[in-house]
Amino acid sequence: MCITSPTPGSGQLGFFTGHLLLAPLNLLKHTAHPDKLFSRARGFTLIELVAVLVLAGILAAFAGARFFQREAYDARSFTDQAMGIMRYGQKLAVAQNRPVFVRLDGVSVALCFDAACTAANRVLPPSGSNSGNKETLAACNQQSNWLCEGKPATVSMATVPANTTGFYFDALGKPYAQGDVFPAASTFPARLAVTIQGDGSTRTIQIEGETGYVYL
């Protein structure tokens, strides 16, 4: 048997199939002008840019005003600060086995080791300083090294029962009215509420009379 190789050329046979092989496709003829293929994807049209600018302006007008409205931020921030101070006061009383007083004078929330909050008995902040803003310094005797936070001007604070100016946690973390003398029975209410209002809403911090649990 004689096997011959295919003759080179445009009409050569396939080695295995015996069919004519097609000439290679000229791929370069479609890419002679590549800039024409991408001419439609070079950027945005003027109409598209104007539409984006209009939408951005609308968002800035409505969302920007809400973003820079401080009442909501101030109310939430002061609520968190006040609740954190009271919770820390309870833990500190238990840890140091001594009474810790919470001052609620209507413009600030502060911790002390005596009812009068004398300079030598003011609780130091765990972080070393309070927020140091102008309201805090004004309400806290211009001290930044005291665990005391003043309420922002856009926020109001009240208590239920009304006119509660303070209380203290004993060494077991139980709350007592400020005038109570341990180990006499506590006259602290069943639940003290500290309401903080701002941005049209009210946030209420609750202190349970039996356990001293502080929650929102």
Image (cartoon, rainbow, N blue to C red):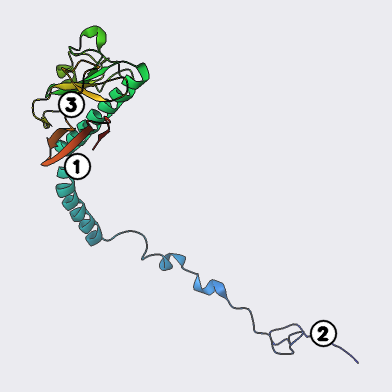
Question: Which amino acid type is marked by label 1?
Answer: Phe
Q: Which residue sits furthest right? A: 1
Confirm whether residue 24 shows in the render.
yes
Secondary element at tag 3: loop
Task: Give the residue number, with chain letter if any, for mark 1.
Answer: 67
> In whole angstroms, how far apart are the C-alphas of marks 3 and 1?
41 Å
> Residue 80 at x, y = what percent?
24, 33
Task: Say if 117 sits above or below 172 in the image.
Answer: above
All told, the count of numbered labels is: 3
Which of the marked residues, 3 or 2, is nearer the chain's N terminus?
2
> Tag 1: Cα neighbours inside 10 Å, few (<14), some, or many (≥20)?
few
Task: Say if 116 sits above or below 66 in the image.
Answer: above
Q: Which residue sits furthest bottom? A: 1
Q: Mark 2 near mark 1, Cβ–Cβ under 8 Å?
A: no
Which of the marked residues, 3 or 1, is nearer the chain's N terminus?
1
Task: Give the residue number, with chain letter if any, for mark 3.
Answer: 188
Which of the marked residues, 2 or 1, is nearer the chain's N terminus?
2
Q: Mark 3 near mark 1, Cβ–Cβ under 8 Å?
A: no
| Comparing labels 3 and 1, the label whose residue is closer to the camera | 3
Secondary element at tag 2: loop
Question: Which amino acid type is marked by label 3?
Answer: Phe
Confirm whether residue 133 shows in the render.
no
Task: Name the residue located 86 percent from the left edge and 88 percent from the top edge.
Answer: 3
| Comparing labels 3 and 2, the label whose residue is closer to the camera | 3
| Comparing labels 2 and 1, the label whose residue is closer to the camera | 1
Task: Give the residue number, with chain letter if any, for mark 2.
Answer: 5
Between residue 50 and residue 62, name the one nearer to us. Answer: 62
Task: Say if 117 sits above or below 30 in the image.
Answer: above
Between residue 43 and residue 36, name the one nearer to us. Answer: 43
